[in-house]
Amino acid sequence: MSVARRVGPLLEQAITVLLNRADRGNTVSIKAALRDARETAPYLVASDEELTEAIVEAATAMGLCVAFDGRE
């Protein structure tokens, strides 16, 4: 089972909405996406690793590049 399914369809939709701000081919920062997700939904219980995987899956499906800067 993929992590994106474990974090739930509502979170997947929220991530997609956050990523829709970027144009196709742009780079998405994991650090910024995690921050935005946590600010938008402060009640999230998903770990950063689970969110990162969900963000990567959604971003690549949308044709976005991913900057793995989450540990900086």
Image (cartoon, helix red, strand yellow):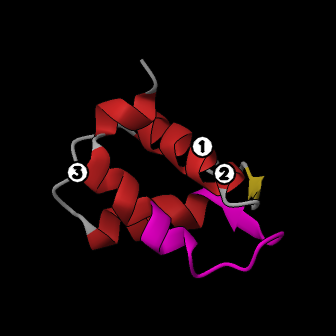
Indicate whether residue 54 is drawn in magenta.
Answer: no
Residue assigned mark 1: 57
Residue assigned mark 3: 44
Q: Foreground: 48 or 16?
A: 16
Query: Looking at the image, is mark 1 or mark 3 earlier in the sequence?
Result: 3
* Secondary structure category for the residue under label 2: helix
Residue assigned mark 2: 61
Which residue extends farthest right? Answer: 25
Indicate whether residue 22 is drawn in magenta.
Answer: yes
Q: Is 65 rendered above or below residue 52?
A: below
Q: What is the distance, in whole Å, between disc 2 and disc 3 at their CAs?
A: 23 Å
Q: Is residue 19 left or right of residue 38?
A: right
> What is the x, y in percent for residue 34?
47, 58
**In the image, which is nearer the foreground, mark 1 or mark 3?**
1
* Secondary structure category for the residue under label 3: loop
Q: Residues within 10 Å of mark 1 (few under 14, many from 20)?
A: some
Image point 80% across, 72% down: which residue? 26
**In the image, which is nearer the foreground, mark 2 or mark 1?**
2
